[in-house]
Image: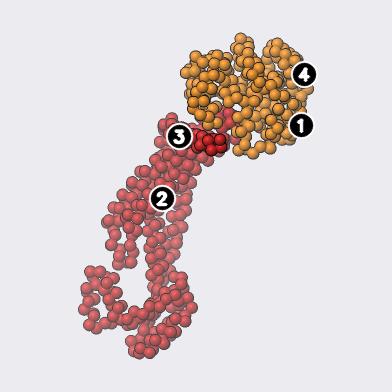
Chain colours: A orange, B red
Amino acid sequence: MIEMKDVWKAYPNGVMAVNGIDIHIEKGEFVYIVGPSGAGKSTFIKLMHREVKPTKGKILIEGIDITKLRNRHVPKVRRKLGVVFQDFKLLPKLTVYENVAFALEVIEEHPRYIRKRVMDVLDLVKLKHKARSLPDELSGGEQQRISIARSIVNNPLVVIADEPTGNLDPENAWGIMEILEEINESGTTIVMATHNKDIVNTMKKRVIAIEGGMVVRDEQRGEYGYEA
Amino acid sequence: MSVMSREVNTVMKLRTLGRHGKEGIKNLGRNGWMTFASISAVTVALILVGLFLSVMLNLNKIASEIENNVEVRVYVDRTASQADQQQLKEKLEKVKDVKSINYQSRKEGLNNLIDSMGDDGDVFASLKKENPLPDAFILKTEKPKQTLTVANTVKRYPHVSEVRYGKGTVEKLFKFVDIARNIGVVLIIGLLFTSIFLIANTIKLTIVARRKEIEIMKLVGATNSFVRWPYFIEGLLLGVLGSIIPIVLVTLGYREIYLRFSGKFESFFIELVPYNTMSFYLSLLLLLIGAVIGVWGSVSSVRKFLKV
């Protein structure tokens, strides 16, 4: 479902972030992207939702080559993806409910559907009772759950998470993993870049290790493989 | 089914438009002082533009009136007979660049003169008994600038006593109007760009604060036009609000000037553009210009932030 064929990315400042990556991710998989800092994980994630374009190579999502996509067709692909960030990226002036509903308003869903769907998703991340709070009134773990709720509210095929537990304490981190696993069990593919050794080693999922912009290891039921 | 979905689509678009409108208005309030600054910039620029416009519209009118009135008067020798005059007319008709020939008898000439003087014309009434004016052919040329060559050609014809074509003054007037027009255009364009720049910058300041919002919108799959719409409306409102004071000031001011001076220049063959016409066009133009610079300034400042 997600395919990268000989993908290269050089930034204008000369940094070679990705140097010839070939991977194939099936529908419903749960994949960890691991590797030392500066290995190219973030670029890899950004390539997947076309925040950056590769200098060379093909990236296929459901058979569509997103590198060839015209700018005005990019939104259509993004609507099939949900993105979760380390720093949550919530809008501080909007309530929890509004932050999640925002993703559906932007794609012009019907208000009645939005109301129902947002409450369902908030229920899934167990924050229905905080619907009217502002993000600042929530803990980091809760904020990340809101951001996950926003990423899945439009029923994406893939959730792409860039170090979603990076800013959280272990307890909250595990809470996030539980939710992501639940989402994965319902059939959504999950690609998660992480530095968290415990999580990777405990969950026993596919692990893709990136170093120097290349895939150096790709194992089913893999281990983190680095010192934490 | 397809009809149904199309209907749903239209309804959704209207609703979305409502959302954009609400967002646009909300933004105006949210950025209170910036909004005020932008509107003031538009207001100042448009007042000046309005002033220049009213001067230029009048200049244009005067220029085109002069152009239409430029003519060569060929006065006929008083001793010329009917047959001589007929001969002369035929010769005149063959001159290059002549568009039309009108014969004005000495009697008509005097009457026209008296009429054109208005009340003062009575002074000449006594001349009716012994008319000093000669008969004349009035030639019009294809282009005003051809009067000179035509006049020079005609001057040498038999039975022509005198040729007049407003030597010198016409050329000077044209030059003056041309220069004034160019200066006006340059100034107006300069002013417009300044205010677009001001609006763009003011809005850019507010957008920097909203950059995160745009980024998130783009990441969850908002189209560029969806992001742009509220800014479009915000700019439109800024421009329209900014044009209100200039419209009121300039139209009232013009009315004052028009009432005070209209008719005063008639003896120079100059008439101001009527008040009603002027206020209509000025209001329309200022409103339009305001809207365009508002939208332009606003939308151009979002562009940079859409590349997510």
**Sequence-wise first label, 4 or 1:** 1
- Residue A17 in view (yes/no): yes
Of tags 2 and 1, which is closer to the observer? 1
Q: Are marks 3 and 4 in contact (CB under 8 Å)?
A: no
Q: Chain of mark 3?
A: B
Pick the residue in front: A112 or B194: A112
- Quarter residue B138 falls in: bottom left
Label 2: which secondary element: helix
Amino acid on which the number 4 mark rests in the picture: Glu
Q: Which disc is residue A6 wearing?
A: 1
Label 4: which secondary element: strand
| Residue holding disc 4 | A219
| Residue holding disc 2 | B285
Amino acid on which the number 3 mark rests in the picture: Gly
Whether callout 2 and callout 4 share a subunit is answered: no
- Could you give the CA–CA distance between mark 3 and mark 1, rounded to whole angstroms? 46 Å
In the rendered image, residue A67, in percent from the top left (x then y), is placed at: 69, 35
Whether callout 3 and callout 2 share a subunit is answered: yes
Amino acid on which the number 1 mark rests in the picture: Asp
Label 3: which secondary element: helix
- Looking at the image, residue A95 sits to the left or right of residue B77; the answer is right
Of tags 3 and 2, which is closer to the observer? 3
- Could you give the CA–CA distance between mark 4 and mark 1, rounded to whole angstroms? 19 Å
Q: Are marks 3 and 1 in contact (CB under 8 Å)?
A: no
Pick the residue in front: A77 or B119: A77
CA neighbours of label 2 inside 10 A, class few (<14), some (14 to 19), many (20+) = some
CA neighbours of label 3 inside 10 A, class few (<14), some (14 to 19), many (20+) = few
Instruction: Relative to B205, say whether B239 is above or below.
Output: below
